[in-house]
């Protein structure tokens, strides 16, 4: 028996991420989507809805709390000292699953392109409250959860973001 391709389902209203394969739920964890709500437009700092795929997976083998900027490790490991030094920084930690839209005109191409908006599923500091919106458009997860997710999916895995 062959398992179906896993799919990641993100519920903005419930602030949950589920990883499913066939009828099995492999993960069900709290997340945080955009503080500005759901939206597709470039510069909106909203979480885009609809069907997506994982375009790239970044950070394999990196330590928990590895800091990324521009999708590259900075050489820093997040800690309270860094948090105090850079209080306004939007921390992208541990792993990055870079999303691309699959629906032309909704989340792909033009002024609504998820990939060109740099929308990721990524790790966040442990003191960030999950279960309520607060990101700048991306989907934030606990570092241990994003590692677990990263290890169970591949480039091309479908991601559905349910906005309502």
Image (cartoon, rainbow, N blue to C red):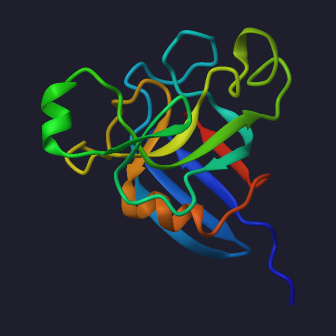
Q: In this view, does 6 lie above or below 162?
A: below
Residue 14 visible? The answer is no
Could you say which quadrant of the image residue 41 lies in? top right
On the image, the x and y values in percent for residue 83 come to 19, 34
Tally of numbered discs: 0
Could you say which quadrant of the image residue 124 lies in? top left
On the image, the x and y values in percent for residue 23 come to 69, 76
Residue 156 visible? The answer is yes
| Residue positioned most to the front | 75
What residue is drawn where x is 71% and y is 15%? 112
Q: Which of 151 and 164 is in front in this view?
A: 151
On the image, the x and y values in percent for residue 82 come to 20, 36
Q: Which of 70 and 50 is in front in this view?
A: 70
Quadrant of the image containing the C terminus: top right
Q: Is residue 133 above or below residue 9?
A: above
Q: Nearer the viewer, residue 121 or 68?
A: 68
Q: Is residue 13 left or right of residue 86?
A: right
On the image, the x and y values in percent for residue 27 come to 51, 68
Quadrant of the image containing the N terminus: bottom right
What residue is drawn where x is 86% and y is 23%? 104
Q: In this view, does 68 lie to the left or right of 130?
A: right
Q: Is residue 32 left or right of residue 38?
A: left
Could you say which quadrant of the image residue 15 lies in? top left
Q: Is residue 14 left or right of residue 58?
A: left
What residue is drawn where x is 24% and y is 42%? 128
Q: Is residue 79 above or below residue 3?
A: above
Q: Is residue 29 above or below residue 48?
A: below
């Amino acid at each position: 028996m062959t398992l179906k391709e896993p799919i990641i389902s993100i519920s903005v209203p419930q602030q949950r991420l589920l990883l499913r394969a066939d009828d099995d739920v492999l993960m069900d964890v709290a997340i945080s989507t955009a503080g500005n709500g759901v939206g597709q437009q470039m510069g909106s700092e909203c979480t885009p809805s609809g069907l997506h795929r994982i375009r790239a997976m970044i950070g394999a083998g990196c330590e928990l709390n590895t800091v990324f900027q521009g999708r590259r490790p900075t050489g820093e490991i997040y800690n309270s000292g860094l948090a105090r030094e850079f209080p306004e920084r939007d921390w992208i930690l541990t792993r990055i699953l870079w999303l691309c839209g699959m629906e032309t005109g909704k989340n792909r191409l033009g002024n609504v392109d998820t990939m060109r908006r740099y929308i990721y599923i990524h790790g966040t500091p442990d003191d960030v409250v999950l279960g309520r919106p607060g990101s700048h458009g991306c989907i934030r997860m606990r570092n241990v959860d994003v590692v677990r997710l990263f290890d169970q999916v591949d480039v091309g895995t479908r991601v559905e973001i349910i906005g309502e």
